[in-house]
Amino acid sequence: MNPANVTEFYRRLRELNPEPSTELKSVNTYTLLVAVVLSAQATDVGVNKATGPLFKVVDTPEKMLALGEVGLKNYIKTIGLFNTKAKNVIALSKILFEQHGSQIPRSREQLEQLPGVGRKTANVVLNVAFGEHTIAVDTHIFRVGNCTGLAPGKTPRHVEEKLEKATPAEFKQNAHHWLILHGRYICKARLPDCWRCVVADLCAFKPKTPAPDSKEAKAKKKKA
């Protein structure tokens, strides 16, 4: 995708949603970190259902340590891989309490040293909590980057690097949110809604999917 089209791509997404934000619920930077760790291989909706009650009683590393691993599991047992995630959350809370004065470090290197925190999680925290121009490439953004031609790459890191290079400075703060929401609700994995996509004419994906009630869609159903 050429630079002019990249700019127009983001301009349209911004026009549609001027102030995008993460769909994960949190009450402070610590709970944001916990929510992102819990969201690995899980939906934001599922995580929010579990953390809603949890964050009413736990909003600091000290309170999490007081709750303990067993207590935490009772709150997050509906989330996939909850046993491993509970261990990681307790372990990272201990490190934050003992080594960082219960504060969330603003360093990618220090964040990635915490149990359960990889590059994607660190990027989300740096972007949402600290306003850094990071782009956390999850499955949605990886798909959007490749399908649209915005930033094709074989690995999430490759797509991330290409997005950072291609994205104009004025859009970098919110690029992560626009792309993940676009991938979650429009450029979907199973069947993208090209017929209601505001950037369809800029996108390299072919063939475009028609509206469900269109003649083209009905004709395809008959052939099938």
Image (cartoon, rainbow, N blue to C red):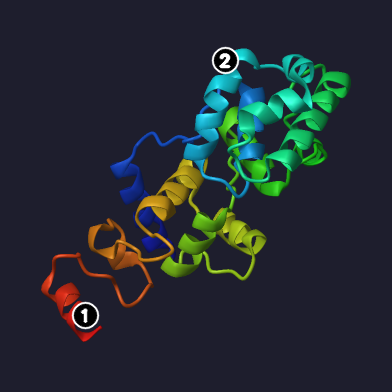
Which is more toward the observer, 90 or 75? 75
Quadrant the N terminus occupies: bottom left
Q: Amino acid at mark 2?
A: Lys
Residue at the farthest right position: 98
- Secondary structure type for disc 2: helix
Q: Position of residue 182 (x, y in %)?
A: 39, 52
Q: Amino acid at mark 1?
A: Lys
Tag on residue 220? 1
Q: Quadrant of residue 16?
A: top left
Question: According to the image, label 2 marks what residue?
Answer: 56
Q: Is residue 139 above or below residue 110?
A: below
Q: CA distance from mark 1 to mark 2?
A: 50 Å
Q: Position of residue 140 (x, y in %)?
A: 50, 56
Give the mark nearest the N terminus, 1 or 2: 2
Tag on residue 91? none
Q: Position of residue 113 (x, y in %)?
A: 83, 39
